[in-house]
Amino acid sequence: MKPEAVTQAITNSFVQGGSQWLISTIVAFLPVLWTMALMFHLGRPYVLRTLRRIGLRLGADVWWMSYLLIRDALLLITFALGWIFFNPNTVFNQALPITAPIAELCLLLALAVKLSRRVDDDVNAYRLSTVFLVLGATLYYGPLVFAVEATSQTYLAGFGAAFTSNANPTAALWIMWLSLLGVALVTGWLFVQAVRSASRSMARRLAQRETKPASAGR
Amino acid sequence: MSVDQLTHAIVSGINSGAEQFLEGTLAAILPVIWLALLGLELGRPYILQMIERFTLRLGADLLWLIYVGLRDFLVISGVVMSFMFLFPDVVTADQLPLFGGLAASALFGVLLVKLMGDPDHNLTHYRIVMALLVAGGLLYFVPYVLGVQFNSAAPAGAFATISSFLVTSSNPNWAVGIGYVSTALFAIMGAIAAGYTLITGGRAEVPESTSGQ
């Protein structure tokens, strides 16, 4: 083999290997994010209990604000990094949990509930977002633990073949496309909600501005 | 050897090397996390003594908040980083403490008690938390020191046998079995936590019944 060929091989390796390494790092990091997102969401009663015992308003506000920021940022980052499950090439070539796109859809639905209803004041909205999160996490963890990360276990080979994306690409791609459709629908609905809400609040502000000079002139 | 074959070999090397490096780093950081969280949990009386000496309420509140936040974040980090003990491929390939999954379950139990009880103000709950931490610490550190960190130095005979028994890669059947038990414990405790928050609706306590009033 000539030196040029070795150079080309090493260059290709860095490009392909770097890309695969990035994806596999995201896949390895996603269970961490899912678990933390779930823990922060489910840990709300504990955070509230601690909050009640803080004597000063400043401390309570800092505590609650930090909790909200970390909890919601974790949900958003988990969804953003999980976008790799909607890349057909990645789903086709890499060993990923086959139901991960549905888990991502559940995560988006939990976020949609948070965006459209007051989850921290409305108990039923909180329950609904909890159900979506728990369902999503279960759909993510199940195939990850017993299929993707259990290739060494021969008695789980059937389960692994059925629930790993590159071992069952047809089903994986169908699940991915259907979930992507769901994501598009939810995102579209969120967009309409945001525009409606903004139009309503802006119209109210404009109406207030118009009535103020009139009343001032009387 | 063709260029494609060489490329493939290097890519495989990079990927498996990076994965092992990541898992190795997690395994190396976990004892530090365990020690730090045990230190903070055991240091509660010291923090309370310091809080009593504060003349300004703001300082006392901030110290307590930072302490509680750091302590609980370390417990969460410990559970999250121990997730690798649940993966059969990882425990059979890497040298990890045999009972690491059970230690992670004990840590998850601590979080469950914190969620459903009040260990900072209820003595029984505090004792349960401490018992779980002691159990988890022993389950983690005994196989870590006597297995993972001792297996190459252990003299042949009973020591070497015990040492290799306590390492997941040299005892894969037990490691995978314990992994499944830990997964089941995680699933049960996770379901209890989810059920609790669904019943309370995310509020601090279960609301008292108002029917008939």
Image (cartoon, rainbow, N blue to C red):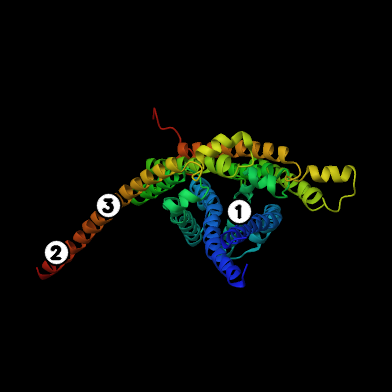
Q: CA distance from mark 2 to mark 3?
A: 27 Å
- Name the one closer to the observer, B35 or B87: B87
- Identified at 61% across, 56% down, the residue is B12
- Name the one closer to the observer, B54 or B206: B206
Left or right: A197, with A138 as reference point: left
Query: Which of the marked residues, 2 or 3, is nearer the chain's N terminus?
Result: 3
On residue B77, the disc is: 1
Near mark 3 (Cα within 10 A), the count class, few <14, some 14-19 or many ≥20, is some
Residue A8 at x, y = what percent? 56, 68
Left or right: B35, with A150 as reference point: right
Q: Which residue is mark 2?
A: A211
**Quarter-wise, where is residue B161 in the image?**
top right
Mark 2 and mark 1 residues within 8 Å of each other at the beta carbon: no
On residue A193, the disc is: 3
Residue kind at label 3, given as amino acid type: Gln
Residue B9 at x, y = what percent? 62, 58
Quadrant occupied by the N terminus of chain A: bottom right
Q: Nearer the viewer, mark 2 or mark 3?
A: 3
Same-subunit check for callouts 2 and 1:
no
Residue kind at label 2, given as amino acid type: Thr
On residue B46, the disc is: none
Left or right: B155, with B95 as reference point: right
Residue kind at label 1, given as amino acid type: Ser
Residue under mark 1: which chain is it in? B
